[in-house]
Image (tube, helix red, strand yellow):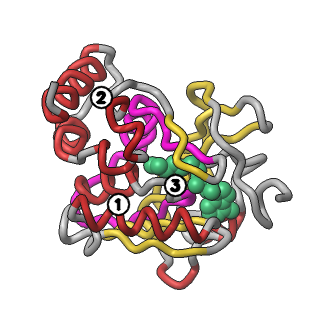
Amino acid sequence: MEYAELRRRLVERLVREGIIKSRSVREAFLKVPRELFVPEDLRRAAYDDTPLPIGYGQTISAPHMVAIMVEELELEKGLRVLEIGTGSGYQAAIMAEITGPEGIVYTVERIPGLAEKARRNLEAAGYAGRVEVIVGDGSKGYPEAAPYDRIVVTAAAPSIPPPLVEQLKPGGILVAPVGDRYMQRLVKAVKKRDGSLDARSGVYCLFVPLIGEYGWPG
Ligand code: SAH
């Protein structure tokens, strides 16, 4: 079966399950070719709803988990987004598709080899101009391009890194898996005018660890 057909079936299922809710997320999932973000020998599994290994002991998140995070972010055209944990670059591409040419996605990856691969994946999928991949410790955020309308962490954090709160605009939304190494809950937080966070815990999840100054020791 062709990738486009497999993609359509996966999206239909995520819509039916109530995981994809909005039209913009649905359209982005229908458009971004996930097969270009997984290793070549795993492409036949690109549209299984499962995480896949991408090298260096890291994984591309399962499509339903990307959908949950992106729905929680309430993305719109023109927003400035910061992602911590580029991995394959797939989620960055989904977000760039939604924020459109007027928006921008900055994504930070600590493993240089993965960042380089993600750049190539994004280029191949046509998102090179809308996504900037930065190598570094994303637990410190990326102050150079702050403030952001949205911040998403795609690695498990012991708690929400304070620099990320600082770099979020008032009214901005932050989504991050928070917990211990073996189980987390997806936290959605809105930054209030006074600079504090209004946070609530959502679904249980399992992400690879955020390693860095405000994450886990490496
Ligand atoms: N969003 C990715 C999946 C990310 S997996 C995708 O769509 O494919 C989590 C990634 O976070 C891994 O690549 C890991 O190397 C990275 N990571 C872990 N700690 C980090 C840190 N402190 N700063 C930046 N990236 C980090």
Q: In which quadrant of the rendered image does the C terminus lie?
A: bottom right
Residue 181 horizontal/vertical position (percent): 78, 38
Mark number displayed over residue 20: 2
Q: Is disc 1 in contact with disc 2, using a CB cutoff of under 8 Å?
A: no
**Horizontal and vertical percent for residue 146?**
50, 77
- Residue located beneath label 1 in the image: 121
Compared across the picture, whether 136 is left or right of 21 comes to right
- Residue closest to the far front: 41
Magenta run includes residue 65: yes
Badge 2: residue crowd in 10 Å (few <14, some 14–19, many ≥20): many
Q: Is residue 3 magenta?
A: no
Q: Which residues are magenta?
A: 58-85
Nearer to us: label 1 or label 3:
1
Tag 2 or tag 3, which sits nearer the N-term?
A: 2
**Residue at x-position 64% and y-position 32%:** 206
Residue drawn at 63 percent across, 65 percent down? 111
Which of 168/210 is in front? 210
- Helix, strand or loop at label 2? It is loop
Which residue is at a point 46% across and 27% down the rendered structure image?
50
Amino acid carrying mark 1 in the image: Asn
The N terminus appears in which quarter of the rendering? top left
As measured in the structure, the alpha-carbon distance from the residue carrying label 1 to the one carrying label 3 is 11 Å
- According to the picture, the residue beneath numbered tag 3 turns out to be 87
Instruction: Establish whether ligand 1 lies closer than 8 Å to the Cβ of label 1.
Output: no
Category of crowding for the residue at label 1, using alpha-carbon neighbours closer than 10 angstroms: few (below 14), some (14–19), many (at least 20): many
Q: What secondary structure is found at the residue carrying circle 1? A: helix
